[in-house]
Amino acid sequence: MKRAWVGGLLGAWLLVGAVVPADARSARCESWSGELEGPPTSLDPDPFRSHWAVRRARELAAMAEELESRSRSLAAPLWRHAACLDPRRRDFAARARAATPAKVYRPPVLEVDHGHEFAVEADLAAPLHLKSRAGEAPLPTPPIVFASLRRAEVHLRDASFEEVLRWVSHGRSFLPAGRTSERGVQMGVRLEVLGATASLALGDEPGARAHLAAALAANPGLELDPASVSPKVIGLLAKVRGREEARR
Amino acid sequence: MSLPSSTRRPAHGAVGARRAATGLAALLILGLACVSKPPAPRPATVRVEVVRGAAGMPEIPAAPLYAVVDMRRPGGAGADPDLLLHATRRAARRHFGSLSQDVPVGLVVLGEGLGETCGDPALIEDPPLSTGPELGTRLNRFAAEPPASLAAALELVSARLAGEAGDGAPARVLVFSTLGSHCPRDVCAPAQRLVAQGAQLDWVVLGDVPAPECLAQLRAPLADGGVHAAVLPQPPAEVAFRVEPRGGHPGYHRGDAYVPAALEGRSGGPALQVAPGLVEVRISLETPLNLWPVRLSPDRETRIRVLDFPTLGLQRSFVETEPEGWPWFVPRRFR
């Protein structure tokens, strides 16, 4: 008789061990506000408490599913609690592990000749296709060059000439040497013209000449629009151009 | 010396007669009592408990997205820094382009402008005003923002979330970065704070720099209030129930004095004393629950426990009669 009891208990223990993962059995749930004391799990011997645990876990899982589309951080504690209340549901435990509040994605960067650089893609881990920059092809102009140009223009309108010179110098430093694209060259020339304007306003004619010489080196046929550029700068450009041509 | 027999006999006879009269009187009283007061019925007791689940999720407003775009050229050897910088911008732009117009977006850019390397960034776009597709086209303009630290950017977003009205809208924080070594400030503490605020953190990392290990260890707690308040079970409410006698018990058909009309009680309240026999118990839940037949035994408490999970559309009742309901607690002599 005693042997039958021991055998039965051992069988039940082995059955529970096979069905319920070890980490779930060892995890101790904490009661949330309003829940039954304990709280019970689906393995509770009291059928009422065990049914409550199964239902409560199902209810939490349904709500976690709904929340997860908005925020994994909000869903994660619900998945964990559901897995704790019903340790037989391995899928709840798997969802609890997957719902980490912080995730890191590393999209592979692929250089292709005919890429889809402007493709719209919601998947954060999808590969990025960038145009090939191999060989002597011009490099894309860094956005800081354009942004520096905008800042310099704003400061020139405000007559903050020292700030103009700082942004001109800053933007110029990001132009890729030797492999500047057509657009990059245009931006570099505009930066130099702004630098010359600011230097002249500060009474620094040698500085202005240096800026205009750099602009002519990048674009020898440079013509300035009298509607938007100071006559002094246009006059100085002519002088610099004459000197450069005489030097050649 | 003995008393005369004449004096002893009458005395003896009088005592006997008195005893007989007393006995008769007692029998008479007992008989009268039996006739006028039938044996007291032994009532059964009924107790109802209702355990409820959550009421259901409230409508959640559209989650704002806070994007932190690190537009600093990564330092150090290894992959081409210009390529990584270009890839970072592209990754941000292509994701912004995929966002729906009704997703409000806030933007923090760590640029390459003039300023301190580890300064404080500014929220250059507010969520209600900007949308993803529109920001994607303007992203390059923000490259001249000061080169602030990533940790400070996360702190800025955290402070912004803390200042927002507690409507429970869960925010999403999206970081695009090469994790360059510009400003070695710890990002773990602000990241943990954001997670505790219910935000979801997604990091898009370009290049090979390993992400901080702490990110994988972050655990989101159950927040007080907000959306999480809705996932807690509803407090045990007082639900009305009604016990109605039904046929099957002979006492009801004979019209005995103790046969009651239907009795009403409230769950969680004192036990209701009713006549034993077959009854129907009607519990006034949102979806009424009728239990039939429930057999009530004299001198025993019948406990009806009800699980009510409205979000699952599910009710379940457990009817247990003491002591049969808990055989392992019952001493052998009661079996």
Image: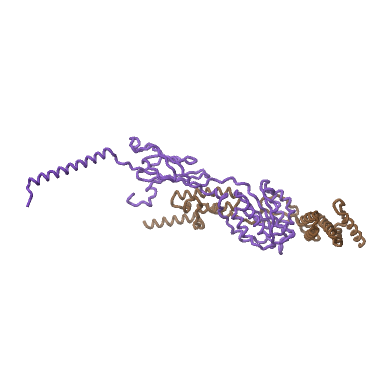
Chain colours: A brown, B purple
Q: Residue furthest bottom?
A: B77
Q: Is A33 left, or right, of B9 in this rendering?
A: right
Q: Nearer the viewer, residue B318 or B234?
A: B234
Q: Nearer the viewer, residue B103 or B329?
A: B103
Q: Is A27 left, or right, of A153 in this rendering?
A: left
Q: State the residue at coordinates (40%, 57%).
A: A6
Residue B171 higher or lower than B31, as above or below: below
Q: How many marks?
A: 0
The location of residue B68, given as percent across then percent down, is: 68, 55
Q: In the rendered image, is residue A113 in sight? A: yes
Q: Nearer the viewer, residue B232 or B24?
A: B24
User: Residue B283 appears in which quarter of the rendering?
Assistant: top left
Q: In the rendered image, is residue B304 in sight? A: no
The location of residue B86, given as percent across then percent down, is: 73, 56
Q: Residue furthest right?
A: A246
User: Residue A94 appears in which quarter of the rendering?
Assistant: bottom right
The location of residue B272, given as percent across then percent down, is: 39, 43
Residue B59 higher or lower than A218, as above or below: above
The location of residue B87, given as percent across then percent down, is: 71, 56
Q: Is B168 left, or right, of B239 in this rendering?
A: right
User: Residue B216 appears in which quarter of the rendering?
Assistant: bottom right
Residue B315 higher or lower than A184, as above or below: above
Residue B21 higher or lower than A3, as above or below: above
Q: Nearer the viewer, residue A172 or A100?
A: A172
